[in-house]
Image: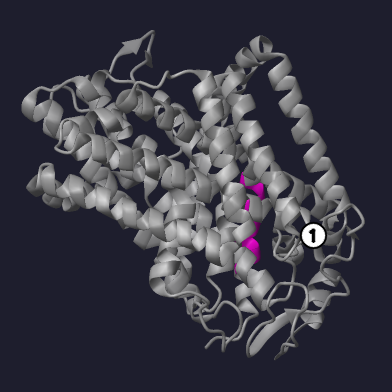
Amino acid sequence: MGEHNVAHNSRDERTKEAEPSSEGVPAPEGPANLIDTDYVIGQDNLATDKLGFSIDLHGKVFTISALATVFFVVITLALQAEVEPLFNAMRDWLTGNLSWFFLLAGNIFVLLCLGLIVSPLGKVRIGGMHAKPDFSYSGWFAMLFAAGMGIGLMFYGVSEPMSHFGAALGGTTVEDGVRTDWAPLGAAANDPAGAASLGMAATIYHWGLHPWAIYAVVALALAIFSFNKGLPLTMRSIFYPLLGERVWGWPGHIVDILAVFATLFGLATSLGLGASQASAGLSYLFGVPETDATMVLLILGITAVAIVSILAGVDKGVRRLSEINMGLAVLLLLFVILVGPTLLILTGFFQNLGAYLVNLPALSNPFGREDANFTQGWTAFYWAWWISWSPFVGMFIARVSRGRSVREFLIAVLLVPSLVSVLWMTAFGGTAISQLVGTGFEGVQDAALELQLFVMLGELPLTAITSFVGIMLVVVFFITSSDSGSLVIDTITAGGKVDAPKPQRVFWAVIEGVIAIALLLGGGLVALQAMAVSTGLPFTLVLLAGCYAIVKGLMSEPRS
């Protein structure tokens, strides 16, 4: 950026008491360094109530996003046989050639967040120096957790530790000078304790600091530029330090459209995983046929419930569902800890946390890796998936985190959910591993990924009840993700308005369900993963630019 723009920004940003906003984004409370721009939130919107219902949307962003998405769905459903190998090739090329880029970007996000926690910039308060939190700690944590990775924990809580354990225990295999096994790092051949430790460390690596740092970067950037600097709550606002007033033109449109695509396909991946697991659970418990038709009906039914939740609003809909889900998740977790190998889980929590910290430098190394299948098939996919989720989760976290200091925000968003993930993976994955090593039960190991949770619960008391709770958790996580995602996409496509008409959110909830159906029918899990990775790639560049914007934005803010 040239000197002219630097001078322009420093001249136009000034600390002052904010005036009330009438556009849905709350004005800062107390001193805050507002950006003085002529842009008015929603000025480029098409607004009318002559259609029998109200619309208020950004013409270019909404139209391009909606038309491109509908075109993708039609092509995928019309050419199912042709698109499946294409999805396969796309995923393999992206993860095979660019895994180093995803790993390196992930490390940058973690280092930035940890640096901000200990720096004086951590004293800045989101929403102005006198802002008060909108939600209690319990409500805030429930929404952070439910929005962030609910379905993923249910799907991978048993299957991922088991997968890494089995691969590590089997040791390394080399063909033509290239490793062909899926074990992390150097494996732990014929060493059950070592394989369990390495397997849990690799799992926690995928669900710990790195994904939450990705979410935190987007959430903090959005929160600062919206609640402190008075810009719209949309991805383009992050780029103001880089682009100045040009963010309101096509450069900003492209950023917002990329955010919509990333969110839609990241959500569709999760909804597809959730539908396949709920279908497997219903088949396991009640003998419901595990077919495409079952999964489609599940997606349709859950989307309908999500629409009801949308119409109820954030406070009544998302918050209540998130708190119900948190309660159910805690009950299931406590049940597994109490009736499973309790001592092993409690001691394993600290052992696994230690193994994670010891192996973290090696696991996060982006260069010269020999465990290509692990870094490309697991880590690169996860990082791209988390990044594709980041506009959705980040914007949602930003909306519910007003009034927190940057330090409080980062500690909560980074450390609390990471520790919960460690406990969850230790309880569920550790129980499944102990069933295999301790009693020789091979049922979990032999089951399909989406069924492994239910097979593990089948070896514990009250199987029917706990498995049903497991299905309910998947369904409610599914609803909260769809609900929150629709809210975020609608905000982006409404030019940053957070109070746009509800029919628009209903439209996006329907679109999310339709994309999940199209991807499941057009290539199953591979198609879901391919689209998450392909939309995650360009958005990684957006996040890296966001790192610069966060530091620049925070440096100009008054500190409490």
Is residue 108 in view from this perspective? yes
User: Per the image, is 542 magenta?
Assistant: yes
Q: How many marks?
A: 1
Residue at (21, 35) in percent of width and height = 463
Q: Position of residue 502 (x, y in %)?
A: 72, 57
Image quadrant assignment for residue 19: bottom right
The majority secondary structure of the magenta stretch comes to: helix
In this picture, residue 420 sits left or right of residue 305: left
Quadrant of image for the N terminus: bottom right
486 over 560 or under it: above or below: above
Q: Looking at the picture, does residue 218 appear above or below residue 90? A: below
Quarter-wise, where is residue 527 in the image?
Answer: top right
Assess whether residue 389 is covered by the magenta stretch: no
Residue beneath label 1, please? 495
Image height of 175 relative to 248, above or below: above
Magenta residues (range): 540-550
Give the residue type at disc 1: Gly
How many other residues sit within 10 Å of disc 1, few (<14), some (14-19) or many (≥20)?
A: many
Q: Quadrant of residue 140?
A: bottom left
* Position of residue 241 measured from the top left corner of the image (x, y, whole percent): 74, 66
